[in-house]
Amino acid sequence: MENFSIKGSNYIPTVHFDAKSGVLEISGESYHEYTVEFFQPIIQWLREYLATPGREIVFNFKMVYFNTSTSRRFLEIFDMLEDYQRSKKGKVTINWYYQNNDFDMLESGQDFAEDVNLPFNFYTF
Amino acid sequence: MSELVPNKSIYEFYRLVEEHHILLAFQGMMTTDILTMMGKNLKEQAEDHIFHRRIFSVMVELVQNINLHSADKAYSESDKKMVGKGIIVLSTSADGKIFTVASGNLIRKSEIESLRQKIDHINRLSEEQLRDYYLEQLRAPEDQDSSGLIGVARRAKNPLAYDFIHVDEEHAFFLLTVPIHQQNSDK
């Protein structure tokens, strides 16, 4: 499967999914007003990637800021990953990075960690 | 036919901005490009980046609220769709310790009651209840949820103040005011 990349700009995050290593990363800022459209190809790539069972996935979130609308899309991704781990013998690790002292971003990660059944690690960057 | 703005009005406008310590104001179509410009402007004034990001996050949600829910919409060339129009104002208290983000837009009068209930409900919840409600609403159908407003209440750590001003038979002007205290940025 091909890798997937989006070069970030003002309100668009940088995305790099490495199909072979299973390291998926999203970073930067995301406050697109129409996140359904923006995330559609990302979700689509993931759906195809997760069709193969037994993958080992490390998902790095290195976000500086994201809006509520983006939170909805992240939750959608977490639900997919949770389902993959439960029913497709996948092994998923979430690394949630937040800038030093940015407790808002830490809290956002903790929200997700409480809501979905996936292992979360928290790191500063 | 609109007339030219008299010089005196422009001066009064300038005075108003000075008097109320308005750092940033925009009236018109709430496009994503406008948000980016406001974000850059905020960064230039920033000393405490994390606090300013918190202010920006409140602005983003209020701008997107106008975009989605304003009764006054126009076609945006940059966004290639209809976007809501309204006003957004960022000001500080005289001592610079409290920042207030205010938004205003036209709504249909039939929407007043449900909006009032939505905001009153959010204002009654504790921090923990807000988190649970937020997560619940993130899974609610798009455009019907309150997650944007809940997010604002959580970031601001203050109740959301609102007002409805009579415009005409069908419309009201919906005002939402969110104060953010500087010391709240470090827990």
Image (spheres, grey):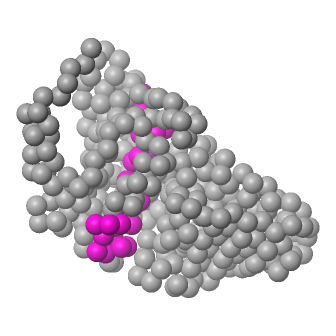
Corner quadrant of residue B27: top left
Q: Is residue B29 above or below residue A19?
A: above
In this orientation, does residue B78 appear? yes
Q: Which residues are magenta?
A: B43-71
Q: Looking at the picture, tell me which residue is in the foreground, B85 or B134.
A: B85
Say whether residue B49 is magenta: yes
**Count of residue discs:** 0
Image-quadrant location for residue B73: top left
In magenta stretch: residue B44 = yes
The relative height of residue A113 versus residue B111 in the rendered view (above or below) is below
Q: Which residue appears at 14% of the width and 40% of the height?
A: B13
Q: Position of residue B125 (x, y in %)?
A: 38, 56
Q: Nearer the viewer, residue A122 or A114?
A: A122
Quarter of the image with the N terminus of chain A in it: bottom right
Asked whether B146 or B90 is in front, the reply is B90
The majority secondary structure of the magenta stretch comes to helix
Say if residue B126 shows up in the picture.
no
The location of residue A81, given as percent across then percent down, is 75, 67
Residue A57 pos. (x, y %): 78, 77
Q: Is residue B156 left or right of residue A94?
A: left
Q: Is residue B91 left or right of residue B126?
A: left
Residue at point 80%, 60% (across, down): A45
- Determine whether B47 is above or below B8 in the image: below
Q: Residue at x 31, y 75 (%)?
A: B48
